[in-house]
Image (tube, coloured by chain):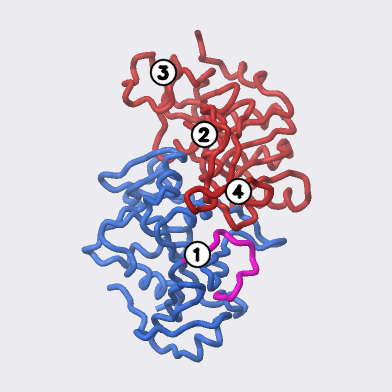
């Protein structure tokens, strides 16, 4: 099965109203080429799930600035004033989730679990509307799974089968998101032949990755 | 010595050989420069490192701290994904976290992630750090820019976590928190008890062993 795509095949995979998981932590580990393509083709009413909204010009920021996003589920928006303004003005819904809880909700969504019990957020506004359970004398919140229509990942290297290797802190949410979406697309800096990545070094197994696109070289 | 340096120097004394430590953005990141030479700690960074160090030479792709600034990795460092990072944090594998604060109260509650109607940056990893780190130290200036106390009977800003703070270090004093009470342990040089009473929005006990605020180095 050929997973490798040309850039002109990427756009048609996205439709208005989709939910998209986006790897990255302040744009480090975000697939910038796919984000740019979405901005160019104007796909709208998106729900984005990721760590943060970076800045107005980095990471997923351009999609928020251009009004293509109707909801974000993130742990942090403080570095992007446009997100804050759109939230205050009611133009965009913002669901703030503690970072570790976000990771666990995505893990649940991708690994067949019905939820996770976490002490994070107990006694804060995060517990509002959630089931609270006591286990061994400590209180926990039941946090529910998250999935998306598409996950877009950024890797340093892939083989043609789709095994992925990430670079340093660019790993962050990418590996867990590879489990939690119906369609998983990896943007990669380098493509090698299948067999050229030592199995011990694979960080995301090929079976999780549906499509691969090679980053355009910076002009 | 300015307020931030005084606070950072004092916090450094809480970090012991071999500790795994997560430092919040801002003032807490000043702490490592005041560690004695014979104390070696491992810095955990929620974006995926154990063994974070200072930037040396040119920045390398993907080597950034949780505030997005270029950093380095020390020999023996490890890199991992967000699930592993927060398993370390929530699972009690971080000995100490040092965080900034907007308000702390006598029940050990901390508010540091939003001011309704004004500033809502989001909690990032702060709620998980508070829930899971073995010891939580709040490092903050004693009063707000307008002179309002930050140590209170009850926080009135939305909480980041309930009952998790055990030590507060300001430029004026060091307070422990136990059994629902602040306990004044140390006063900064030249600071008297009345000044601290005036600038603190809660009653507090004075430790029998009250002493001058210690500084590292």
Q: Residues within 10 Å of mark 1 (few under 14, many from 20)?
A: many
Write down the region rendered in magenta.
B151-165
Between marks 4 and 1 in the image, the one whose residue lies nearer the viewer? 4
Q: Residue under circle 1?
A: B100
The span from disc 1 to disc 2 (Cα, nearest Å) is 29 Å
In reply to whether residue B153 is colored magenta, the answer given is yes
**Sooner in the amino-acid sequence: mark 3 or mark 4:** 4
Q: Position of residue A41 (x, y in %)?
A: 70, 26
**Which residue is found at the position 43% from the left and 49% from the top?**
B89
Q: Colour of chain A?
A: red
Density class for disc 2 (Cα within 10 Å; few <14, some 14-19, many ≥20) is many
Give the labeled residue for mark 3: A159
Q: Nearer the viewer, residue A135 or B198?
A: A135
Asked if marks 1 and 2 fall on the same chain, the answer is no
The span from disc 1 to disc 3 (Cα, nearest Å) is: 44 Å
**Image quarter for residue B28?**
bottom left
Image check: B48 left or right of B146?
left
Are labels 1 and 3 assigned to the same chain? no
Residue of label 2: A107
Does label 2 or label 4 sit earlier along the sequence? 2
Q: Is residue B211 visible in this depiction of the protein? A: no
Secondary structure under tag 4 reads strand
Q: Which residue is mark 4?
A: A132
Q: Nearer the viewer, residue B204 or A137?
A: A137
CA distance for labels 3 and 4: 44 Å
């Amino acid at each position: 099965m050929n997973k490798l795509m040309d850039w002109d095949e990427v756009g048609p995979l996205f439709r208005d109203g989709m939910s998209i998981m986006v790897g990255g932590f302040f744009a480090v580990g975000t697939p910038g080429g796919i984000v740019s393509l979405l901005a160019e083709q104007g796909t709208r009413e998106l729900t984005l799930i990721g760590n943060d909204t970076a800045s107005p010009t980095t990471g997923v920021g351009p999609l928020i600035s251009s009004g293509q996003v109707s909801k974000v589920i993130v742990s942090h928006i403080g570095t992007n004033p446009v997100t804050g303004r759109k939230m205050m003005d009611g133009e965009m819904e913002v669901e703030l989730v503690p970072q570790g809880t976000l990771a666990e909700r995505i893990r649940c969504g991708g690994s067949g679990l019905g939820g996770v019990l976490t002490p994070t957020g107990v006694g804060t506004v995060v517990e509002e509307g959630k089931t609270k359970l006591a286990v061994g004398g400590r209180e926990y919140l039941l946090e529910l799974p998250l999935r998306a229509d598409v996950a877009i990942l950024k890797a340093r290297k892939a083989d043609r089968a789709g095994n992925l290797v990430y670079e340093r802190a660019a790993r962050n949410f990418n590996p867990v998101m590879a489990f939690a979406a119906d369609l998983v697309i990896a943007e990669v800096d380098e493509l090698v032949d299948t067999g050229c990545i030592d199995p011990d070094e694979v960080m995301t197994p090929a079976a999780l990755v549906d499509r691969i696109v090679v980053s355009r070289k910076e002009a | 010595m300015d307020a931030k340096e005084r606070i950072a120097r004092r916090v450094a004394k809480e970090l012991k050989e071999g500790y795994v430590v997560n430092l919040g953005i801002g003032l807490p990141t000043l702490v490592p420069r005041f560690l004695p030479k014979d104390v070696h700690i491992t810095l955990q960074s929620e974006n995926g490192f154990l063994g974070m160090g200072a930037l040396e030479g040119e920045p390398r792709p993907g080597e950034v701290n949780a505030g997005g600034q270029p950093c380095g990795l020390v020999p023996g460092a490890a890199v991992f994904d967000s699930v592993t990072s927060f398993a370390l944090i929530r699972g009690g594998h971080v000995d100490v976290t040092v965080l900034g604060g907007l308000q702390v109260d006598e029940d050990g509650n901390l508010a540091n992630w939003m001011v309704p109607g004004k500033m809502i940056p989001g909690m990032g990893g702060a709620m998980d750090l508070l829930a899971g780190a073995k010891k939580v130290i709040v490092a903050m200036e004693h009063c707000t820019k307008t002179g309002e106390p930050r140590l209170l009977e009850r926080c009135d800003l939305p909480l980041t976590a309930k009952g998790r703070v055990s030590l507060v270090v300001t430029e004026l004093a060091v307070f422990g928190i136990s059994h629902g009470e602040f306990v004044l342990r140390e006063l900064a040089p030249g600071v008297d008890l009345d000044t601290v009473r005036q600038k603190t929005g809660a009653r507090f006990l004075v430790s029998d062993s009250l002493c001058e605020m210690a500084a590292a180095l």
